[in-house]
Image (spheres, rainbow, N blue to C red):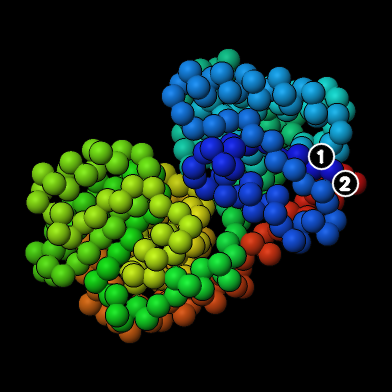
Amino acid sequence: MRILEIGPSEARSRGGMAEVIRGIRESEVLSREFEVDSFPSYIDGSLPVRLLYSLYGYLRFLTCCRKYDLFHIHTAERGSTFRKNFYLRRVKRAGKKAVVHIHGAEYLTFYDGLDSRKKEIVADFFRRADLVLALSGKWKEELEGRFQMSACQVLYNGVEPEKLQRAVSDPAEHRNSFLMLGRLGERKGTYDLIAAAELALRQNPALKLCLAGDGEVDRVRALVKEKGLEQNITVPGWIDGAEKLRRLREVATVVLPSHYEGLPMAILEGMAAGKAIISTTVGAIPEVVGEENGILIAPGDVPALADALLRCSGDPGLLADMSKNNREKVEREFSVRRMHQQLAAYYRQVME
C-alpha cells in the first residue's frame, strides 16, 4: 500500500507537526507493511512566501496524487484546514481514501469563532474524511460533539526513548535548572513563566531557566533584560539536535505552562529524557501528566507556577521519582513504536 502524508515541510518548517510527519515517513514499524512518502504543502516564511508555496505545492500535488492508495492529511487550525480542504476534495473525487490528523492546539476555539459559512466548510472537511485522528480522548469527545463524526479515533504522539538517552542525567545535580521548549509567546505561557520565575527567585536566587524556541524571541529577550533577569533566564532561540539534547541534560525539569495545547512533543521528549514536568490542565496534558510524574496547574496561575518551580528545586527525592516514572511511562505508553503500531492498525481499518 502506498501512502502519502500531506503537511508542513520536514526541512523548511518548525514544530511538532513536522516532527510527527518525519517520524511516520521514517518508521521501521510502518515500512514493513506500507510505502510512506511525505508531501510538503507548506513552509515557514513571510505571508507572500507561504501563499506562493501553498499554490505551487497544490499544483505539484495534482501531478503525483494518482499513484497513492491512501492519503494521511495533517492539519491544524486557521489557514491549514482551508488549504487541506482542497487536497481532501481532490482525493475524494479520485475515489481514494483519506485520514485527517488534527494537531492544532486551538482547533476548537478557532472553529467556534468562524462564521456559519466557514463552519460548514470545516464540518464538510471532517465528513469527507474516512477517519479523523485526535490527539487525546478529550479531543475525540469534543470533535465528535461538534461534528457528529462516527469515524474518529485517538492517536497519541510518540517519541523515541533511545534518541533521548544522551539527555538523561541525575536530577539532583540540576534541581535548580528548568527548560521550556516551544514557540515563545502568550499561548505557550512564556510570559507567565517569566513572572513566576521573578516570584520564585525571591526565595531561591539559584533558579535558572532556559526559554528555547522560535516565535516572540526578541520580545521575550527584551522583557528578561527589562526585569534584570539575564543572570537567571537565557533565551537562545530555536534549538534542535545535539543542542536540544545538551540543554535537556543540563536541567531536571521541563516547563510548559500553555494556555492551549494538544499533546506537545516537548513534554514527551522531557519525559523520555527523565525530567519532571510542570505544565497546565489543557488539551491532552492531563491524560499524560499526573501526580506521579509532574505538577499541573491552571493556565495563567502565576503564583501556582512559582510554587511548582520552588517545589521541584527544593525536593531532589520528588525529582528522582518523577524522572524514573516518566521514563517508564514513555516506554510503556508513548513510544513512537507504540504510536506507529496503532497507526498501522488504523491504516488497515480504513482500507478494508
- Residue 275 percent location from the top left of the image: 41, 71
Name the side, left or right, on which 26 lies relative to 171.
right
Label 2 Cα crowd, 10 Å radius (few <14 / some 14-19 / many 20+): few
Question: Percent from the top left, x then y, of residue 28?
Answer: 74, 61
Query: Residue 174 at what x, y percent from top left?
Result: 29, 75
Query: What residue do we see at 64% from left, 46% from top?
Result: 21
Residue that label 1 marks: 70
Residue 139 shows in this picture: no
The count of marks equals 2
Label located before the other in sequence (2 or 1) = 2
Residue at left 64%, top 53%? 23
Location of residue 91 with respect to 280 vertically, above or below: above
**Image height check: is 56 above or below 8?**
above
Q: Which residue is mark 2?
A: 1
Determine contact: label 2, label 1, CB under 8 Å: yes
Question: Residue reaching furthest top?
Answer: 117
Type of the residue with mark 1: Leu
Kindly identify the residue that appears in the image at 75 percent across and 43 percent down.
37
